[in-house]
Image (tube, rainbow, N blue to C red):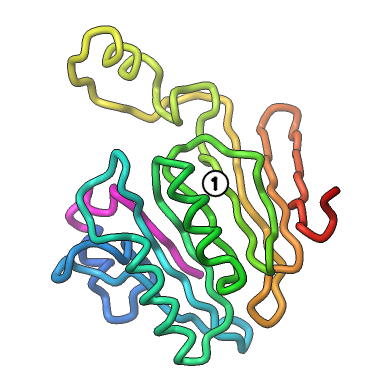
Amino acid sequence: DFLTSGNHAWDKKEGIELLKSPDYRVIRPLNYPLGVPGFGSKVLNICGEEIAIINLMGHYGMPLVDNVFISAKKEIDRLKELGVESIFIDFHAEATSEKRAMHVMLKGKITALLGTHTHIGTDDLIIEEGSAYVSDIGLSGCRDSVIGMDSEAPIKRFLTSLPAHLDIPKKCKKILQMIIIESNEGKAVDAYKIKALDEKEAIISMKAMREDNMI
């Protein structure tokens, strides 16, 4: 139904037109400075329910943007005033500390916060106070690689400190990663992380820990 993005939203100039479309189905991080093309959130009507999607971007190792924590609080307050209870956040950030801090600040107020950007999936899927959280969903693409890219260029960069163009391998072992969340009245009630591998059609599923089931 919808696409979020991150710091690479501007890599292709034709993509900027999609961000500006009146009936936009792609958003860029909310906390880019005022005047940047596009929108950082949208309320969708899916199966008769209003669902808000917010795109955020962190600070460590990322382009200079507005304070992500202040931006998130303001937008959630605005959505709550509109009566929207189901709020999903894609937090595109390098540092797990930023993502975890955001979850702790917002738990109980949103349906889910899902981390992206590092390409490496984490195993900390949890539900606390009705809010699902994972530090990073992980990439869908080539898993026998360096963050989905052909390994030669990244290794050259690390060995020489010289720039090298990153390319997607033509052949590779693939992985599809996703989070499936069941929600009710704006609260996450169940969540699963799924990894589907092309090798032997393996599927790995991980159920979210729940705070009320912890020892």
Q: Residue furthest bottom?
A: 82
Q: Quadrant of residue 14?
A: bottom left
Q: Which residue occupies the foreground of this view, 198 or 79?
A: 79
Q: Is residue 179 above or below residue 142?
A: below
Residue 147, quarter of the rendered image = top left
Percent position of residue 167, x then y: 33, 28
Q: Secondary structure at mark 1?
A: loop
Q: Main secondary structure of the magenta part?
A: loop
Q: Is residue 192 magenta?
A: no
What residue is at 63 percent from the left and 65 percent from the top?
131
Residue underneath mark 1 = 135
Left or right for 85, reference 60? right
Please determine whether, in this image, residue 61 is positioned above or below residue 112: above
Q: Position of residue 58 (x, y in %)?
A: 35, 51
Vertical position of residue 67 compared to residue 43: above or below: above
How crowded pointer 1 is (Cα within 10 Å; few <14, some 14-19, many 20+) is rated as many
Q: Give the percent coordinates (x, y) of residue 54.
A: 43, 68
Q: Is residue 104 left or right of 26 when viewed as pictured? A: right
Count of numbered circles on the image: 1
At a point 38% along the width and 73% down the height, the residue shown is: 41
Q: For the residue marked with disc 1, what is the amino acid?
A: Ser
Q: Which residues are magenta?
A: 1-14
- Front residue of 17/48: it is 48
**What's the residue at 58%, 26% (across, down)?**
173
- Residue 32 x, y percent position in the rendering: 23, 61
